């Protein structure tokens, strides 16, 4: 690691050129989309919207053309997703496939797997969830117990996943499961693409504290998988999963989750803010600008084929603190109490994001895990 | 050009700007030999156009140099000289030899060719022959003022003992007075000063981070290096995040600045650096314990500067307030487009 990894990286003009087209599309498509829905950020699920994006070529756009993608640069994808997030567009349906599963299938998948999944991902029609956590394996992911055993040319899976976002409305789950016994826990793990319509799979949504259903328990009871459900190499699941993390932790979704509340705050404050309001809005803007530049710098490193896992963890941790601080600061700035029902847009968005904020430092790795990774990268043992 | 600048300055500073040299250059002890070495290197004129006798370097080339000034706690006005000579160049005026400083605030007025008023918080004021400032007149005027022409001087220093002086002028004849070009804002020196300090803060934090990691790995308590304790690790992780943010802010500000300074990126850089300075100094001192509180230890060479630099040329509150007011003027619909563009925008779809 080195602080000097953070080099200033402008979005190249050819990627930047996409922006106005995306903005025009969003202004038109989301014309009457209410503020409280925009506050869902990348948790807003709308399959029809995902298909429309797919038709535009804005899902899986970094994938090769032969699979329905656009061979677009990581920066082009960045422009599209940051505009979607800033507008609060409902991107959840295709989000994990676009960010993680698609690139992973491209990287590790067989030709048959690519043909089966990538074109449908790019059309915005095939949705994925990520099966990692288990009831007794949260931050300590290497302790997972869900197991796949070989039977002839099949795999049989037993176990349970939990906190699986979108499992109840996805077609596939890419799950990390144990396939062997090794003295080192990280060995003997493998990844499978599991068709969620198979017999033996039970999916139960878990209501979050707001009453919404985003994440799930997934029970796997003697689920029989074809041999080609394995993705990548048997026993290499851990390294495959950790290679995804730089992609998972450095994107704009790691600091834009509360931007809807900045928008309603500026509306509520009006054109003539008092000194405290002006200061806090300016300070949030300054931090947002810097986080975005850090995130773009990681994108440039990813585009150059480097592994910026350390820098990505910095973006994620600093970004989560930022996203969580927004409701805390904002509730001090206007005499508008949060309302879960009724009330103005600002009051509703404040209520919603105040309650969602705790999840921002859970998903994608807790604050403590990230800081541990950062410290190790700094040479602290 | 950037790599050559960075490596040249790093070699020079590593050789000459040792902690002992920095301590020796406390208030009033002008390190003349060090300045002579710097002048020989030509860096004081780096940002001056080649036609006017400089190296024609752009701000993007100089970010590393200014970060190194912060990292080594250079007890000389090299950043100030860079900015003052750059502004002279922007106004079509030749660069000045020798150290130079500037006044970003005060009450200077130009009337009938003479300057009156006060120049405040002039870095290294007592040590330089002249300073540049913007004097109010019919139009804002760039003036070059001889320090010895001041009618009164009030000597001050910041928390690190760096001179921050005040000069009063009564009908003084400037060495130079030219109208500020129309595309140069009247607060250009405040903005430029904020940009310089953001990079110096980033540099100082980077040095402190390395010092803190080394100490945490060496210092043994309870039978093991304190850096193996999770509580210490997490604090240093936070220090590194803020260091990274301040580096990123400064790099963006310098990269986007050329003939004009990029107001929004500079504002973001100074706000993030000012915030990082307090958090970073707190963590570094916490980890170092009592030894870091001694005069003998080099930690304070960084932290005592951070505690002043964050407030100089506009505090976090000043720059945040300016940015926040401007963003509210644009309304919610212009907020995101402005941040992406790096300047205040009024998009077609902006709400009335």
Image (cartoon, rainbow, N blue to C red):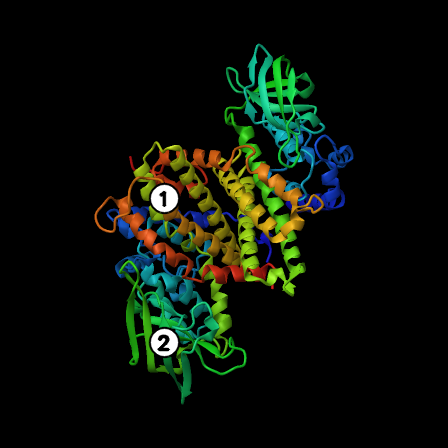
Residue occupying image coordinates x 54% and y 37%: B257
**Residue closest to the eye, B217 or A111:** B217
Regarding residue B259, the answer to whether it shows in the image is no
What residue does disc 1 label? A330
x and y percentages locating residue A303 in the rendered image: 51, 58
Q: Quadrant of the C terminus of chain B?
A: top left
Relative height, residue B103 to residue A43 (above, below): above
**Residue closest to the eye, B53 or B177:** B177
A78 vs A347, left or right, is right
Question: Which badge, 2 or 1, is on the more N-terminal residue?
Answer: 2
Residue occupying image coordinates x 36% and y 36%: B328
- Dot 2: within a 10 Å radius of its alpha carbon, few (fewer than 14), some, or many (20 or more) residues? many
| 2 vs 1, front mark | 1
Relative height, residue A156 to residue A315 (above, below): below
What residue does disc 2 label? A160
Q: Quadrant of the N terminus of chain B?
A: top right
Regarding residue B318, the answer to whether it shows in the image is yes
């Amino acid at each position: 690691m080195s602080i000097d990894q953070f080099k200033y990286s402008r979005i190249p003009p050819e990627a930047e050129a996409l922006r106005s087209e995306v903005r025009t599309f969003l202004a038109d498509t989301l014309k009457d989309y209410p503020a409280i829905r925009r506050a869902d950020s990348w948790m807003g699920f709308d399959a029809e919207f995902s298909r429309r994006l797919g038709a535009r070529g804005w899902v899986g756009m970094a994938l090769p053309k032969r699979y329905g993608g656009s061979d677009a640069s990581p920066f082009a994808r960045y422009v599209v997703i940051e505009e979607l997030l800033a507008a609060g567009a409902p991107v959840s349906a295709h989000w994990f496939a676009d960010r993680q599963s698609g690139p992973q299938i491209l990287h590790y998948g067989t030709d048959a797997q690519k043909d089966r999944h990538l074109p449908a991902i790019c059309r915005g029609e095939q949705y994925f969830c990520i099966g990692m956590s288990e009831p007794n394996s949260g931050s300590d992911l290497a302790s997972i117990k869900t197991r796949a055993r070989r039977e002839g040319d099949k795999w049989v899976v037993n176990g349970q996943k939990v906190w699986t976002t979108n499992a109840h409305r996805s077609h596939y789950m890419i799950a990390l499961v144990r396939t062997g016994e090794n003295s080192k826990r990280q060995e003997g793990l493998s990844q499978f693409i599991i068709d969620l319509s198979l017999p033996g799979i039970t999916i139960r949504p878990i209501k979050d504290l707001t009453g919404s259903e985003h994440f799930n328990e997934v029970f796997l009871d003697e689920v029989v998988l074809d041999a080609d459900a394995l993705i990548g190499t048997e026993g290499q699941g851990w390294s495959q999963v950790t290679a995804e993390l730089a992609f998972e932790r450095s994107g704009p979704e790691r600091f834009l989750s509360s931007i809807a509340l900045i928008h309603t705050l500026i509306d509520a404050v009006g054109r003539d803010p008092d000194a405290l309001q002006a200061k806090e809005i300016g300070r949030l803007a300054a931090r947002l600008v810097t986080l975005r530049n850090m995130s773009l710098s990681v994108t440039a490193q990813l585009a150059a084929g480097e592994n910026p896992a350390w820098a990505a963890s910095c973006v994620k941790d600093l970004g989560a603190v930022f996203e969580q601080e927004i409701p805390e600061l904002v509730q001090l700035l206007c005499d508008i109490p949060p309302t879960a029902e009724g009330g103005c847009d600002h009051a509703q968005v404040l209520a919603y994001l105040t309650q969602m904020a705790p999840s921002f430092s859970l998903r994608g790795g807790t604050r403590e895990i990230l800081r541990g990774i950062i410290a190790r990268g700094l040479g602290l043992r | 050009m950037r790599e050559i600048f960075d490596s040249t300055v790093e070699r020079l500073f590593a050789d000459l700007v040792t902690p002992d040299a920095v301590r020796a250059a406390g208030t009033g002890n002008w390190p003349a030999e060090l300045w002579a070495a710097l002048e020989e290197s030509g860096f004081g004129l780096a940002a001056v156009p080649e036609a006017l006798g400089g190296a024609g370097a752009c701000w993007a080339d100089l970010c590393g140099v200014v970060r190194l000034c912060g990292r080594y706690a250079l007890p000389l006005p090299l950043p100030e000289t860079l900015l003052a000579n750059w502004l002279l160049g922007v106004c079509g005026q030749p660069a000045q030899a020798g150290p130079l400083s500037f006044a970003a605030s005060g009450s200077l007025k130009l009337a009938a060719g003479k300057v009156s008023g006060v120049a405040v918080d002039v870095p290294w004021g007592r040590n330089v022959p002249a300073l540049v400032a913007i004097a109010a007149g019919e139009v804002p005027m760039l003036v070059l003022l001889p320090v010895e022409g001041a009618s009164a001087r009030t000597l001050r220093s910041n928390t690190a003992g760096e001179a921050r002086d005040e000069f009063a002028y009564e009908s003084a004849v400037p060495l130079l007075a030219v109208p500020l070009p129309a595309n140069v804002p009247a607060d250009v020196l405040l903005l430029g000063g904020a940009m310089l300090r953001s990079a110096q803060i980033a540099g100082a934090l980077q040095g402190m981070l390395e010092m803190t990691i080394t100490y945490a790995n060496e210092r043994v308590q309870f039978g093991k290096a304190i850096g193996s304790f999770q509580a210490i690790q997490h604090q240093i992780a936070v220090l590194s995040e803020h260091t990274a943010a301040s580096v990123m802010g400064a790099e963006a500000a310098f990269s986007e600045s050329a003939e004009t300074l990029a107001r929004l990126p500079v504002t973001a850089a100074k706000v993030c650096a000012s915030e990082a300075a307090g958090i970073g100094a707190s963590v570094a001192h916490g980890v170092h314990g009592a030894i870091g509180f001694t005069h003998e230890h080099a930690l304070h060479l960084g932290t005592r500067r951070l505690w002043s630099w964050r407030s100089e040329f506009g505090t976090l509150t000043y720059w945040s307030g300016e940015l926040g007011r401007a963003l509210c003027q644009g309304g919610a619909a212009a907020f995101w487009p402005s941040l992406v563009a790096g300047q205040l925008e009024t998009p077609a779809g902006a709400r009335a």
